[in-house]
Image (cartoon, helix red, strand yellow):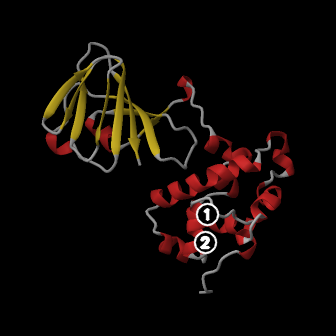
């Protein structure tokens, strides 16, 4: 395998500002809604950090995938260097994305910057809790690079078995949109009405159930 390499043009002072249009300019097909390269560059370090975390990769592992050095990858994630076209292609390939999806530009990438989901466009999701009576609606739309997982949850009428209240990494925020629920976190139980919110450590076992006459709807946002 070739030795790991930096991309010299990316490391030169002032190269990013001088070459931003060349590096990140829109193709003729997308010129009608061209993204300002400066904003794409501002967002890119966050996107790269989030992608690596989602894929559970160390800098060393990503360096092996891309044949780029760890120090250079670290500079990209901290916004200290801007990528060349070659680097963009290497990173996109490593993460299984297109160039536009990685950058959040062009027709494929527009929803990666601002993803709007209309009520009528919410899609059902199948998750671990689906077999326990929970129903989920996705709210993140087409955005693939994210550090949160927002969903609307319709809880079942009865608490799932205690063994099914599996903890997971991260934190969780809940806001009751309609109806009322009972939430059990650890051994404590709270009744939450419409408009009530709760924030807790998701490593604690937790489960909830609908207690109102109508089906409850709860906005749940978990960190990833």
Residue at the image position 52 percent from the left and 38 percent from the top: 140
Between 48 and 95, the residue placed more toward the observer is 48
Secondary structure under badge 2? Answer: helix
Q: Is residue 105 visible?
A: no
Q: Quadrant of residue 68?
A: bottom right
Coordinates of residue 162 in the picture (x, y in percent): 15, 40
Horizontally, residue 79 falls left or right of residue 164, namely right
Q: Residue furthest right?
A: 28
Residue at the image position 60 percent from the left and 32 percent from the top: 116
Horizontally, residue 24 falls left or right of residue 199, namely right
Q: Residues within 10 Å of mark 1 (few under 14, many from 20)?
A: many
Residue hosting label 1? 76
Coordinates of residue 82 in the picture (x, y in percent): 69, 62
Mark-to-mark CA distance, 2 and 1: 6 Å
Quarter of the image with the N terminus is bottom right
Q: Quadrant of residue 152?
A: top left
Secondary structure under badge 1? Answer: helix
Q: Residues within 10 Å of mark 2 (few under 14, many from 20)?
A: many
Q: Is residue 176 visible?
A: yes
Q: Which mark is residue 192?
A: none
Above or below, 46 against 178 in this view is below
Between 7 and 56, the residue placed more toward the observer is 7
Residue hosting label 2? 72
Check contact, mark 2 vs mark 1: CB within 8 A: yes
Residue at the image position 16 percent from the left and 29 percent from the top: 189
Residue at the image position 60 percent from the left and 81 percent from the top: 4
Q: Residue furthest front?
A: 13
Coordinates of residue 206 in the picture (x, y in percent): 23, 38
């Amino acid at each position: 395998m070739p030795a790991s390499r930096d991309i010299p043009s990316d490391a030169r002072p002032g190269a990013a500002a001088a070459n931003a249009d060349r590096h990140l300019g829109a193709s003729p097909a997308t010129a009608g809604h061209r993204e300002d390269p400066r904003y794409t560059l501002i967002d890119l370090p966050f996107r790269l950090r989030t992608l690596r975390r989602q894929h559970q990769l160390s800098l060393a592992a990503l360096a092996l995938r891309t044949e780029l050095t760890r120090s250079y990858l670290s500079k990209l994630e901290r916004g200290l260097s801007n990528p060349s076209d070659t680097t963009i292609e290497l990173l996109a390939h490593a993460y299984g994305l297109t160039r536009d999806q990685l950058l959040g530009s062009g027709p494929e990438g527009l929803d990666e910057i601002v993803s709007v989901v209309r009520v009528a466009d919410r899609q059902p999701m199948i998750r671990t809790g689906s077999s326990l009576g929970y129903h989920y609606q996705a709210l993140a739309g087409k955005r693939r690079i994210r550090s949160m997982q927002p969903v609307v949850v319709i809880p079942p009428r009865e608490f799932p078995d205690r063994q099914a209240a599996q903890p997971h990494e991260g934190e969780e925020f809940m806001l009751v949109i309609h109806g009322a629920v009972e939430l059990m976190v650890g051994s404590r139980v709270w009744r939450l009405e419409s408009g009530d919110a709760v924030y807790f450590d998701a490593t604690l076992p937790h489960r909830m159930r609908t207690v109102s006459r109508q089906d409850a709807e709860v906005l749940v946002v978990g960190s990833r």
